[in-house]
Image (tube, helix red, strand yellow):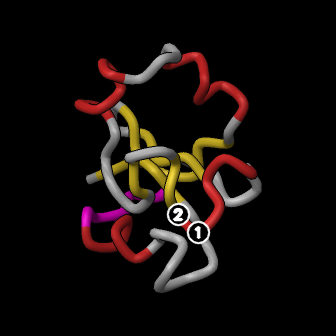
Amino acid sequence: MGLPTYTVQQLALRNGQDRDEIWVAYRGNIYDVTKSRLWRDGKHYEHWAGQDLTPELADAPHTEKVFDKFEVIGVLG
């Protein structure tokens, strides 16, 4: 059984403000970053949770390996 698919609108609700969950998407996968102290209140430096961060990673001081420590909980559809 595959991972559940979430819409952009469903992802947007998991921004750390509207709901308790804090999710971000990268390359089609949705990651739960709720437990990360770096994503408190749904914000990580100039990045906001509840959205696809794929285009923003190019400017980040880290690589995509940062997502390895988070669980993939769904796919963006």
Q: Residues within 10 Å of mark 1 (few under 14, many from 20)?
A: some
Q: What residue is disc 2 on? A: 42
With 75 as the anchor, is 16 left or right in this view? right
* Amino acid type shown at disc 2: Gly
Vertical side of 73 occupied by 42: above or below: below
Residue 16 coordinates in the image, percent (x, y): 54, 72
Residue visible at 53% across and 63% down in the picture: 42
Vertical side of 70 occupied by 65: above or below: above
Q: State the extent of the magenta-drawn residues as a range.
A: 4-8
Residue visible at 29% across and 32% down in the picture: 56
Q: What residue is disc 1 on? A: 41
Residue 7 included in the magenta stretch of the image: yes
> Mark 1–mark 2 contact, CB under 8 Å?
yes
* Amino acid type shown at disc 1: Asp
Residue 8 coordinates in the image, percent (x, y): 25, 63
Residue visible at 76% across and 56% down in the picture: 35
Identify the image quadrant of residue 41.
Answer: bottom right
Observer-nearest residue: 19 or 27?
A: 19
Q: Residues within 10 Å of mark 2 (few under 14, many from 20)?
A: many
3D distance between C-alphas at marks 1 and 2: 4 Å
Vertical side of 3 occupied by 69: above or below: above
Residue 69 included in the magenta stretch of the image: no
